[in-house]
Image (cartoon, grey):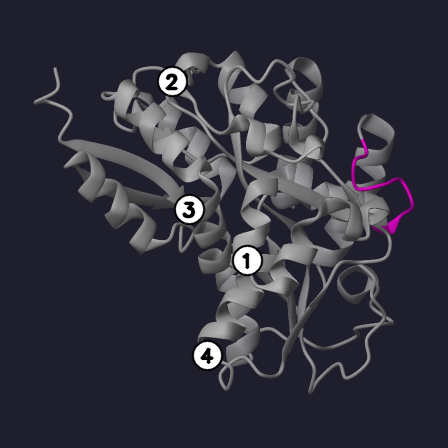
């Protein structure tokens, strides 16, 4: 079997894994890491459902999608004897609600969902979801919304309406859907885009404000300061999503033993720090903080990151999930 494990297949978000860390793993285990990419959790779920659970060894879903993958039989329990480094995690990331027994996933990186905007167009905007949902705050400047999962889309509207980003149930979802429907009808709505495309659109002037993830803005500003110098990011005061991206192994992964080694490799403090520093996302790995630049180390300490504003996306399934998807389908099909 060892001769067959000459490749490891990883399904990940774009620009989310340090190539040097990957190369070091390849050198240590004499294997080739083959990466494929997705732009939303919904896209990832569809791919795994269509047979991808037998094509990939390691996948990087966001926290609230882990139970959906478990319930669909698309990921396998981890072998705790083969996972090293879980004790390095901060207490806030142990025994999480999405995987309380720590059976199926390991936290990789975390960030916040918020708003990216052009400071030339909005020199001093209110730090509110109203920049998207209130036509008085933004009557004519083009704006985009985040594509992908409806729970996040309606969560933003729920937060703006005072129901909290973690709203659940028919009443808050219907109210959020009404607001979303009106928003989609506005002439300056440019469409749904994923997080990385949102940053690019604002940089190019296609949109002046959009929804993205914290690290995607930081990554580009660091890589090309002049190109993105007019872009800034904020977490809306009404509250937003704390997103924890995790490492899981698909149910029929071709190389599960090597997958466990890869996850353990990423959990080593130095490698966890390199991953965070590369992607400009925060690490849940307490032991990695000493290897990070001071600003990233401080922002990675969850208790210091305006914690009361950030909530994990609540777990929904069954009839509630069907209701949510139906409500969102009706919004999008108007």
Direction from residue 253 to residue 208 in the image, left or right: right
Which quadrant does the N terminus fall into? Answer: top left
Highlighted magenta segment, given as a residue range:
160-167
Report the residue that reaches farthest toward the left: 3
Q: Earlier in the sequence, mark 3 or mark 1?
A: 3
Identify the secondary structure beneath mark 4: loop
Identify the secondary structure beneath mark 1: loop
* Residue hosting label 2: 82
Give the Cα distance between marks 2 and 4: 40 Å
Of marks 4 and 1, the one in the foreground: 1
Report the residue that reaches farthest toward the front: 290
Residue 51: x and y, percent? 30, 22
Q: Earlier in the sequence, mark 4 or mark 1?
A: 4
Disc 1 to disc 2: CB gap under 8 Å: no
Give the Cα distance between marks 3 and 1: 11 Å
Give the Cα distance between marks 1 and 2: 26 Å
Residue 168: x and y, percent? 80, 28
Of marks 4 and 3, the one in the foreground: 3
Residue shown at 74% from the left, 57% from the top: 183
Direction from residue 3 to residue 180 in the image, left or right: right
Q: Which mark is residue 317?
A: none
Residue 19, compared with residue 220, is above or below; it is: above
Residue 267 seen in this snapshot: yes
Residue shown at 42% from the left, 18% from the top: 75
Q: Which mark is residue 292?
A: 1
As for residue 143 lying within the magenta part, the answer is: no
Identify the secondary structure beneath mark 3: helix
* Residue hosting label 3: 271
Give the Cα distance between marks 4 and 3: 24 Å
Q: Earlier in the sequence, mark 2 or mark 4?
A: 2
CA neighbours of label 1 inside 10 A, class few (<14), some (14 to 19), many (20+): many
């Amino acid at each position: 079997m060892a001769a067959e494990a000459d490749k490891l297949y990883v399904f990940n978000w774009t620009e989310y894994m340090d190539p040097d860390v990957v190369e070091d793993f390849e050198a240590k285990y004499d294997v080739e890491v083959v990466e494929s990419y997705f732009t939303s959790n919904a896209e990832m779920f569809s791919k795994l459902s269509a047979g991808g659970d037998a094509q990939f060894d390691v996948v990087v879903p966001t926290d609230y999608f882990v139970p959906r993958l478990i319930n669909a039989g698309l990921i396998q329990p981890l072998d705790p004897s083969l996972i090293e480094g879980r004790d390095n995690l901060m207490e806030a990331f142990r025994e999480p609600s999405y995987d309380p027994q720590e059976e199926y996933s390991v936290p990789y990186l975390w960030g916040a969902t918020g708003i990216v905007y052009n400071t030339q167009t909005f020199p001093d905007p209110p730090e509110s979801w109203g920049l998207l949902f209130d036509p008085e705050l933004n009557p004519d400047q083009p704006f985009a919304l985040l594509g992908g999962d409806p729970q996040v889309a309606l969560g933003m509207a729920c937060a703006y309406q005072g129901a909290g980003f973690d709203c659940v149930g028919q009443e808050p979802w219907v109210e959020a859907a009404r607001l979303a429907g009106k928003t989609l009808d506005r002439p300056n709505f440019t469409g749904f885009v994923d997080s990385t495309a949102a940053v690019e659109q604002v940089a190019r002037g296609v949109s002046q404000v959009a929804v993205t993830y914290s690290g995607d803005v930081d990554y580009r500003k660091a890589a090309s300061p002049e190109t993105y110098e007019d872009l800034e990011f904020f977490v809306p005061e009404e509250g937003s999503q704390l997103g924890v991206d995790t490492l899981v192994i698909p149910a029929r992964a071709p190389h599960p033993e090597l997958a466990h080694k890869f996850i353990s490799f990423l959990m080593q403090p130095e490698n966890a720090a390199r991953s965070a520093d590369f992607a400009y996302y925060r690490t849940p790995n307490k032991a990695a903080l000493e290897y990070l630049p001071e600003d990233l180390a401080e922002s990675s300490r969850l208790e210091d990151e305006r914690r009361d504003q950030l909530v994990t996306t609540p777990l929904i399934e069954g009839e509630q999930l069907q209701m949510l998807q139906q409500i969102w389908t009706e919004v999008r099909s108007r």
